[in-house]
Image: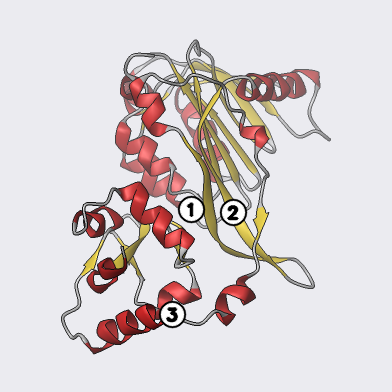
Amino acid sequence: MAKFITGKELTEAICNIISNAKKDLLIVSPYIKLDDYFKEHLFNKLLANSDLHIFIAFGKNENNPWKSIKKEDFEYFKNFPNVSIIYIPNLHAKYYANEKRGIITSVNLYDYSFDNNVEFGVISENSFLAGNDIDYEAWEETMDIIKNNYAVFVKRPNYKKKLLGKDYVGSEIVLDLTKELISGNLSRKVSVFDFKSEYFVNVENQEEKSLTREEFKIQKKTQSSKYQKFHSATNLGRLKNKSYDEVIKFMKDKEYILDKNTITPKGSKLGLAYKKNKSGTTWNVYPESLSELL
């Protein structure tokens, strides 16, 4: 049953849709700007759920996408294990939904809008079992629009199969057109649905692989050095005039990492480690000695 909501009730309903999402979270908003409440109280709690597929659809400002979404927020969403970011140039609609509820509304995912504007919305059940035709049509129409627009970033979870179920072992970036988006060179539309919803890897094979002679020397140097320096991929690359993308590709080709946030057992042997900031965001860091292999 649909219900008209506004004011505090609208704000709480949108926040509940985000925080209660378990399988699907759909954010459709031309303008996105996250404050600490959105990040720390809502989205950060979803970082550990690799089964949750988050769709972020934004639009407008073809000549400068950062006017539609803050660059730091765009990068923030890249940290989620199962996320699709879609650019829709002519987007004006706003829609928030999870696997159970949806809200068609006037409010952007923008901190100023929530705090200062008069906004309306209609909330309804979005369950395929309990929902009505309007709920189903809203979800399906939105998915069709997403399918036919520009996927600019796609990240999918990797799993290890086991007898009963699966174990999450990290995520892999399968599409990153950030540079093309910024430069206005999105020449063709790539659909998020061109990619699998999840991938399976054989972690046992990685564990069986031994180090090369050069890698063994790096391992010994890392272990014996009391003052070993660690760097981000960007800073490690600067030591050898390599770009961030070149470093990440090298690390993946050598099977030291699955993606920029997930270290393999072989990578751990060479001293790769995780670093976490105050907000809970985790990334890989690399021992300086590893630059000798670049």
Say what amino acid the circle numbered 3 marks.
Thr
Q: Percent position (x, y) of residue 148?
A: 63, 19
The answer to whether residue 117 of the structure is visible from this angle is: yes
Badge 2 vs badge 1, beta-carbon distance below 8 Å: no
Say which of marks 3 and 1 sits in front. 3
Q: Classify residue 100 as left or right of residue 111.
A: right
Say which of marks 2 and 1 sits in front. 2
Front position in the image: 209 or 24: 209
- Residue 232 to residue 180: above or below: below
- Residue 20 to residue 4: above or below: below
Secondary structure of residue under mark 1 = loop
Say what amino acid the circle numbered 1 marks.
Leu
Q: Which residue carries the number 3 mark?
A: 212
Q: Find the distance from the CA under tag 3 to the CA under tag 2.
A: 29 Å
Q: Which residue carries the number 1 mark?
A: 47
At 67% from the left and 25% from the top, the residue drawn is: 143
Q: Percent position (x, y) of residue 79?
A: 43, 49
Upstream in sequence: badge 2 or badge 1: 1
Badge 3 vs badge 1, beta-carbon distance below 8 Å: no
Upstream in sequence: badge 3 or badge 2: 2
Q: Which residue carries the number 2 mark?
A: 157
For the C terminus, which image quadrant?
bottom left
For the N terminus, which image quadrant?
top right
Say what amino acid the circle numbered 2 marks.
Pro
